[in-house]
Structures are given as C-alpha cells and as structure tokens.
Amino acid sequence: MPCLLYALKACPINKTQEKSLEFTVNGVLMKIFRTVSVEVIRECRLWFGIPDVKVLVVKRKKKFLMKYANCANRLCQLLFGVDALSKNNSYVQ
C-alpha cells in the first residue's frame, strides 16, 4: 500500500484516480486470494483492516499537514500560514 499511496499526501487526486487506485488494490487482493468475487474481497478487506483508498489518502494527508505545521523551519511555517489563510479566505476583506 505505501508504494501505491506514495506522495499522494502532497498532491490532490480526483475521483478517476481514486477509482484507479481502488481497482489496483482490489486486483491485488483478487490475485492473493485467487477469487473474482467482489463480496469475498470486501470481506477480506474488512477482516484484514484494509480501508478504502479515500480513507487512507485522507489519513496520510492529515498526518503530512500536521508535521508540516509543526515543522521548525521558518519557510514551512510561512508557507503553511499562507496556505491556511487561503483556505479560510480570511485574507480577503
């Protein structure tokens, strides 16, 4: 999974890319468990604790942003402050 999700924390993905990653995860699980049943794959994901790709990307992005915000580097702090302002639209008066 880390290989599939590498660098997605810093890059936005759209629905098509998300579905493509989900298809890849399901395809790998189908090969591992030698099945073509979507129901079996759902159960395997449930029992082995493999969440949807969307959930994984959100968790990784959150972790990345927390590290970025807490970084001691002044440039990172400055950029995070600008990014946070632009997301909140608080710089527009």
Image: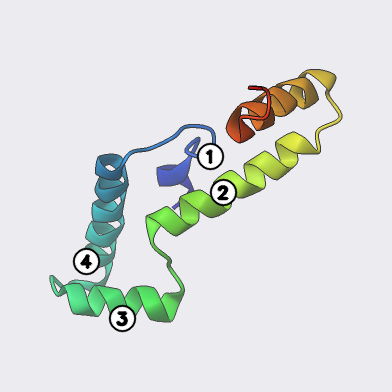
Between disc 1 and disc 2, whose residue precedes?
1
Q: Secondary structure at mark 4?
A: helix
Q: Amino acid at mark 4?
A: Met
Q: Amino acid at mark 3?
A: Glu
Query: Could you tell me how far apart the alpha carbons at marks 1 and 4 are, in whole angstroms?
Result: 26 Å
Numbered badge on residue 30 = 4
Numbered badge on residue 84 = none
Pointer 2 local density, CA inside 10 Å: few below 14, some 14–19, many at least 20: some
In this view, the residue farthest toward the left is: 36
Between disc 1 and disc 3, whose residue precedes?
1
Pointer 1 local density, CA inside 10 Å: few below 14, some 14–19, many at least 20: some
Figure colour scheme: rainbow
Placement of 34 over or under 26, stated as above or below: below
Q: Secondary structure at mark 2?
A: helix
In this figure, which residue is indicated by the disc labeled 2? 60
Image location (x, y in percent) of residue 91: 68, 23
Query: Do callouts 1 and 2 mark residues in contact (Cβ within 8 Å)?
Result: yes
Numbered badge on residue 43 = 3
Image location (x, y in percent) of residue 71: 81, 33
Query: Could you tell me how far apart the alpha carbons at marks 2 and 4 are, in whole angstroms?
Result: 25 Å
Q: Select label 1 or label 4 by which is in front.
A: 1
Q: Select label 3 or label 2 by which is in front.
A: 2
In this figure, which residue is indicated by the disc labeled 1? 9
Between disc 2 and disc 4, whose residue precedes?
4
Query: Could you tell me how far apart the alpha carbons at marks 1 and 3 are, in whole angstroms?
Result: 27 Å
